[in-house]
Amino acid sequence: MTKLKLYTNPMSRGRIARWMLEEVGAPYEVEYLTYDGTMKAPEYLSINPMGKVPAIVHGDQVVTECAAICAYLADAFPEAGLAPPLDQRGAYYRWLFFAAGPVESAVTNRALGFAVNEDQKRMAGYGDFDDMYGVLIKAVSETPYLCGDKFTAADVYLGAQVGWGLQFGSMPAHDALAAYWSRLESRPAWKRAGDLDDTAGAEMGMPPAGS
C-alpha cells in the first residue's frame, strides 16, 4: 500500500485534512509541526515552501492547500464515494473552489478588519462579505448537501469553514448554516478527527479548539 502522511498542527486548517482522511478511511501517518518552529524548518519547507499546514505526501505526490487535498483524496480513494462521477461534478467543483476563493478571502478579510468599499467590489473576487454570505446561505439551503442528497469532499471543505465560522463568530449566525452544520458534525469521521486533534493538541500543550 502506498504510504500516506499528513503534516499538520492540531489547531490549524490541518483539521480539515484530518477530517477528510478520516472520511477516506485509509491508514496514514501524522507529523505535527509547530508555528515558527518546525513549520518553518528547511525539512518542511522542502515539502511546502509556504511553511503552512496542512500538506500530505502520498507516495511521490505532494499536495498542499486544503481544497486540493480534499479533491485529491476523493479521487485517490474512490471507494470512499466522496466525489461525484466525472460527468456530474459541476456543483462539486463550483462549491469546492467557491470555498477556497470567495469564502476564505471574505472571511479572512472580515476577521482582519478589512471591508471592501463600493468602489473596490469589482476588484475583489468575492465582491464584498455580504455578496459571498448571501450565496453561501443559498448554497446550503437548497439541498441537504452541496451536491444534492449525497455528502462529498466539497462538504468537508466548505462545511469545516462553516463550522469554524459559527464557533468563532467569523460568520454571522443563520438558521440555514446551523442546520447544514448539524448534519455534518454528527458524522463519525468528523468526531474521530476532532478527538485525535484535540488529544494531540493537549499533548503539545495547546488548548482545545473553541476554548
Image: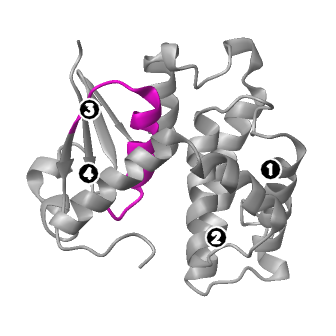
**Which type of secondary structure does the marked residue at label 2 adopt?**
helix
Q: Which mark is residue 140?
A: 1
**Which type of secondary structure does the marked residue at label 4 adopt?**
loop
The reply to whether residue 23 is visible in this rendering is yes
Residue 14 in the image: state x and y as whole percent.
Answer: 37, 53
The span from disc 4 to disc 1 (Cα, nearest Å) is: 34 Å
Q: Give the residue at x 17% y 44%.
A: 46
Image quarter (top left, top right, bottom left or bottom right) of the N terminus: top left
The magenta segment:
10-29
Q: Is residue 57 above or below residue 135?
A: above
The span from disc 3 to disc 4 (Cα, nearest Å) is: 14 Å
Residue tagged by mark 3? 57
Mark 1 Cα within 10 Å, few/some/many (few <14, many 20+)? Answer: many
Relative to residue 131, is residue 61 drawn left or right?
A: left
Residue 105 in the image: state x and y as whole percent.
Answer: 61, 65
Tell me which amino acid carries mark 3: Val
